[in-house]
Amino acid sequence: MAERRMMSKKIIHSDAFLDLPSTTQNLYFHLLLEADDEGFVNSPKKIQRFIGASDIDSQLLIDKKFIILFESGVVVIKHWRIHNYIQSDRFKPTSYTEERSKLSIKDNNVYKMYPNCTRRIGEDRLGKVSLGEDRLEDTMSPKGLITFCVDVVLYLNSKAKTNFKTGIKKTNSLIEARRKEGFTLNDFKKVIDIKTSQWLNDKKMSAYLRPETLFGTKFEAYLNEQQIIDVDCWADSEVIDEA
């Protein structure tokens, strides 16, 4: 296995990657360093624990399509062939042949999982999920918690120029409470757009651009207010492809 690894700026300088929390980015770099010559890592949990990352960081990399997780627990760097090209005389094929057989390579050199082969962090063979009670509410689905809540917080950070952490139980509970009332991700983005247009340039009111204010009991009232100015909509950017 080669001792050197390359990183493509096309991937790590993309908006989708830079919008990830720093702990998630750090986990990706370590997985990239530890991968074999075809981008496979057989001990992602060990690496995760070693650097102090969480299951949420791992799941974010899956949800945002930077890594692919197999039932065996092995992961592969989706854009490995863009990051690294190893000459044939130094190349050592992966030993994870079963996992490799479940992948195709697209025309843009990106790994793609064949249908019905994916799984999530903490999911057992019966499809049950356990991500730890200290970070997650039992009533939240993994998709709801990890993707929905993280997208809301990242959108708030991008609009309000804040740096709120993802995976915080109190923040997640506020978002989940509004979600249970029937509010959608677009509703959260609209509230953030409205209140940032009203408060961002007000030194006193900008302090209230925070989850406990925006996502509390006044959420519906905020949703029905009007923006002062037009604010460009922010959206997750996919890296290279939409697969």
Image (cartoon, rainbow, N blue to C red):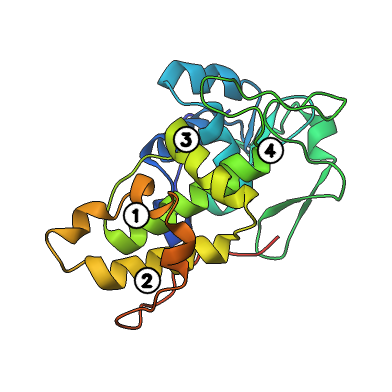
Going from the N terminus, do you reach mark 4 or mark 1 first?
4
Q: Residue at x 76, y 36 (%)?
A: 119
Q: Residue at x 50, y 26 (%)?
A: 54
Q: Residues within 10 Å of mark 1 (few under 14, many from 20)?
A: some
Report, in whole angstroms, how far the alpha carbon at label 4 lies from the one at label 1: 23 Å
Going from the N terminus, do you reach mark 4 or mark 2 first?
4
Query: What residue did someone put label 1 on?
Result: 157
The amino acid pointed to by label 4 is Ser
Front residue (pair 149, 24): 149
Going from the N terminus, do you reach mark 3 or mark 1 first?
1
Residue 220, position in %: x, y? 49, 62
The reply, left or right, for residue 209 in relation to residue 124 is: left
Which quadrant is the N terminus positioned in? top right
Residue 238, position in %: x, y? 56, 62
Front residue (pair 180, 58): 180
Query: What residue did someone put label 4 on?
Result: 141
Query: What residue did someone put label 2 on?
Result: 194
Residue 107 against residue 43 in the figure, above or below? below
Report, in whole angstroms, how far the alpha carbon at label 3 lies from the one at label 1: 14 Å
Nearer mark to the viewer, of 2 and 3:
2
Report, in whole angstroms, how far the alpha carbon at label 4 lies from the one at label 3: 13 Å
